[in-house]
Image (spheres, rainbow, N blue to C red):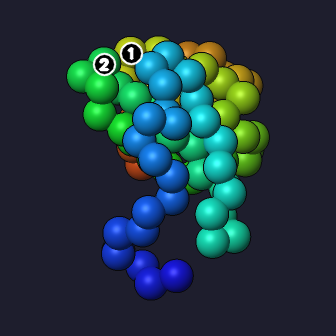
Amino acid sequence: MIRNQWYVILETREVKRGRLLSVRRMGRDLVLWRDTKGMVSCMSDRCIHRGVALSAGKVKGDCVECPFRLHLPVVGRIARGIP
Ligand code: FES
C-alpha cells in the first residue's frame, strides 16, 4: 500500500447510516460510518487508548464512540478526553 493514496475498498452503498462497518483491507482493520450529513468516514478500527475495536462501539452524531469509554468521542483521527 502506498501511503496518502486513494484506494477503492468497497461500494458506498455498503456503509449504512447509524451503523459501524468493520473491514480488513490490505492487512489493515478499518471502521467506516456515515456522519450526520451522509458523508462516509474511515479510520483505523483501533481505539488509540487501549486498542479495542472501535467497530464494537456505536455511531453517535458524527462520531464513533469507543465501547470501553463511552464518553470518548472519536472523529476522524482526532480523539478527545484520552485518559
Ligand atoms: S479503549 Fe477506547 S477509550 Fe479506552
Q: Earlier in the sequence, mark 1 or mark 2?
A: 2
The residue drawn where x is 66% and y is 24% is 57
Residue 15 appears in view = yes
Amino acid type assigned to the residue bearing label 2 in the image: Thr
Task: Give the crowd class for mark 1: few <14, some 14-19, many >=20 residues within 10 Å.
Answer: some
**Residue 39 at x, y percent in the picture:** 29, 34
Q: Residue furthest bottom?
A: 2
| Quarter of the image with the C terminus in it | top right
SS class, disc 2 = loop
Marks 1/2 in contact by CB < 8 Å: the verdict is: yes
**Residue 47 at x, y percent in the picture:** 63, 43
Amino acid type assigned to the residue bearing label 1 in the image: Gly
Taking the image as shown, residue 8 lies to the left or right of residue 30, namely left
Tag on residue 79?
none
Please count the marks in the image: 2
**Residue 72 at x, y percent in the picture:** 54, 25
**Residue 50 at x, y percent in the picture:** 73, 44
The residue drawn where x is 65% and y is 49% is 23
Closer to the camera, 83 or 71? 71
Taking the image as shown, residue 42 lies to the left or right of residue 26, namely left
Q: CA distance from mark 1 to mark 2?
A: 6 Å
SS class, disc 1 = loop
Taking the image as shown, residue 26 lies to the left or right of residue 51, namely left
The residue drawn where x is 42% and y is 79% is 3
Q: Of circles 1 and 2, which is in front?
A: 2
Residue 65: quarter of image: top right
Residue that mark 1 sits on? 61
Residue 81 appears in view = no
Residue that mark 2 sits on? 36
Q: Residue furthest left?
A: 37
Closer to the camera, 34 or 52? 34
In the image, residue 37 above or below residue 14: above
